[in-house]
């Protein structure tokens, strides 16, 4: 699925942000799906460094009436809204990335308080191989597993995603390893740290990982344009 890298990563990642749901019925499952969908749009836009791409879903989450009458933690709901507002008004990728981690952590807080929430099936790793696109697809898989782990409170998913990045060495797969060597090393250190991190540190660590992904994509010309 690689054309050049920019075309591939942009299409793979941003395809997840292409759809917007029409106004949902007040069914709980539909409401939860729409929350997850909007949060996912924020996550995928930030990974490729698209700060403007987070505005619409963040505004929707900050102002949505779909949190009304939900079981769970009022603090969690307010945490989601507050994080969404920080994302909406962020002026840097770092600000938005840290708020995105906080957003996912607030989702988990509400799910835990309600003794309910999503249970994600851990999808198999998409592909093996040594090309740059194989490597990027594995990173996307890993970041999604960590995101799901944050939102659902699943240590299993979190560790699976962090390990997939921490255990892989990208140097031979990248088209210009010298240009991103420092960022690649940073990403792998961050993932190694995240793998063993307590729950309380995971939102901030995930924000750090997003920021590094975005910086690498910007440096290599992969991004929203």
Image: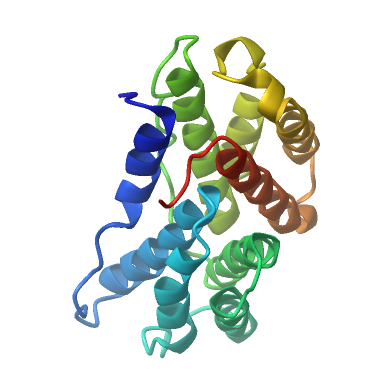
Instruction: State the image quarter where residue 163 is shown.
Output: top right
What colouring style does the render use?
rainbow
Q: Nearer the viewer, residue 106 or 3?
A: 3
61 sits to left or right of 84: left
Left or right of 45? Residue 191 is right
**Residue 199: x, y in percent?**
74, 53
How far across and down, in percent of the image, does residue 103 sit?
59, 68
Vertical placement of 215 versus 57: above or below?
Answer: above
- Please tell me how many numbered marks the rendered image carries: 0
Q: Could you tell me residue 174's position as x and y percent?
A: 57, 18
Q: Answer with the quarter of the image where residue 126 lies.
A: top left
Residue 166 seen by the camera: no
Give left or right: position of 178 versus 219.
Answer: right
Q: In this view, does 50 lie above or below 188?
A: below
Look at 24% across and 83% down and name the residue there.
26
**Front in this rendered view, residue 56 or 79:** 56
Q: Please name the residue shown 67% across and 16% down the image.
A: 169
Q: Can residue 185 be seen in this view?
A: yes
In-front residue for pair 141/182:
182
Task: Name above or below for residue 56 compared with residue 33.
Answer: below
**Position of the N terminus by quadrant:** top left
Residue 25 position in % (x across, y down): 19, 80
- Residue at coordinates 69% horizontally, 60% vertically from top-left? 94
Residue at x-position 62% and y-position 49%: 210
């Amino acid at each position: 699925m690689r054309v050049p890298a920019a075309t591939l990563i942009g299409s793979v990642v941003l395809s997840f942000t292409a759809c917007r749901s029409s106004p949902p019925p007040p069914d709980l499952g539909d409401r939860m799906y729409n929350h997850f969908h909007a949060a996912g749009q924020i996550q995928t836009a930030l990974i490729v460094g698209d700060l403007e791409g987070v505005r619409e879903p963040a505004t929707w989450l900050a102002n949505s009436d779909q949190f009304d009458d939900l079981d769970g933690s009022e603090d969690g709901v307010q945490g989601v809204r507050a994080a969404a507002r920080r994302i909406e008004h962020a002026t840097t990728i770092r600000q938005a990335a840290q708020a995105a981690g906080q957003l996912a952590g607030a989702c988990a807080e509400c799910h835990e308080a309600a003794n309910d929430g999503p249970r994600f099936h851990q999808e198999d790793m998409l592909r093996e191989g040594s090309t740059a696109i194989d490597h990027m697809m594995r990173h996307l898989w890993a970041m999604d597993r960590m995101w799901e782990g944050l939102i659902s409170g699943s240590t299993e998913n979190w560790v699976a995603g962090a390990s997939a990045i921490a255990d892989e060495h990208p140097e031979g797969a990248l088209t210009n390893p010298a240009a991103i060597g420092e960022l690649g090393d940073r990403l792998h250190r961050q993932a190694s740290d995240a793998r063993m991190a307590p729950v309380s540190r995971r939102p901030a660590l995930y924000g750090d990982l997003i920021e590094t992904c975005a910086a690498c994509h910007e440096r290599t010309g992969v991004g929203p344009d």
